[in-house]
Image (cartoon, grey):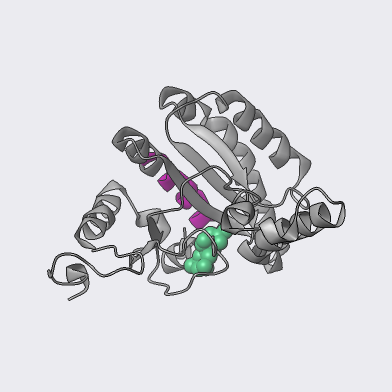
Amino acid sequence: MDGNGRWATRRGLPRAAGHAAGAEAVRPIVTRCAQLGLDALTLYSFSTENWARAADEIDALMSLYVQYLVSERPLFLENNVRLVQIGRRDGLPPAVLDELDRSVEMTASHTGLTLNLAINYGSRAEITDAVRGLCQDAADGRIDPGAVDESAIADRLYTAGQPDPDLLIRTAGEMRLSNYLLWQISYAELYVADVCWPDFGPGELDAAFEAFRRRRRKFGAVAEDSGPVCPDRV
Ligand code: IPE
Ligand code: MG
């Protein structure tokens, strides 16, 4: 969800106003994904690298999480959305963790959309933690190192048990992965929207899905039909 800062700066507003507008933009997207029957939506909202920002911006973001997690509970309840946090807990303020835990617990039995909220998330940290856990289990004799396969690693990630993403959407025109779900997106289709996140609405989401529908996914194999490759980019 990139571009909150630019959205605000272009309007002569403080960056925090961009984050508030960005939080507002989440509701229609979650609603649309839930109504379409998607398995999962993962929102990259705060990375392990975002701690490098100014303290007042971080404080504004943390206050927004507390507000958002409380204000969006009816949305999660009405739409059968299950909330999951992906990311490290260490470093997050207790008020954020409390509201996060409350929302996760309240929605744990929901069977619709899984909403993975990436807070304090970094893909390299996630993979490092997974590898460390596997090494510890091997050192303690709980697993045979020779038996470590791809699924053993996937099962140690925050997204254990969830399908890999089919589509990765990045807003604000940036062509970077920014340490996001590096293991999980191996075969995801990439889609870059030029609009900043606060302007990314259901219409933009539908355009991304439409582009996705036109992609031919080969997963390393050879495509069966001879149609044009990625016609949305020609
Ligand atoms: C995304 O918007 C929100 C967070 C990373 C928390 P940015 O804050 O990165 O917005 P830009 O990139 O400065 O426009
Ligand atoms: Mg940014």
Is residue 32 found left or right of 140 in the rendered image? left
Residue found at x 54% / y 23%: 109
Residue found at x 42% / y 68%: 10
What is the total number of numbered labels drawn onto the structure image? 0
- In this rendered view, identify the residue nearer to me: 194 or 212: 212
- Secondary structure, magenta segment, majority class: helix
Residue found at x 44% / y 45%: 41
Indicate whether 213 appears above or below 35: below
Residue found at x 48% / y 49%: 42
Q: Please tell me whether residue 209 belongs to the stretch shown in magenta.
A: no
Where is residue 226 shown, x and y percent of the image? 13, 70
> What is the quadrant of residue 102 in the picture?
top right
- In this rendered view, identify the residue nearer to me: 48 or 211: 211
Where is residue 68 shown, x and y percent of the image? 56, 38
Q: Is residue 56 visible?
A: no
Q: Which residues are magenta?
A: 17-28
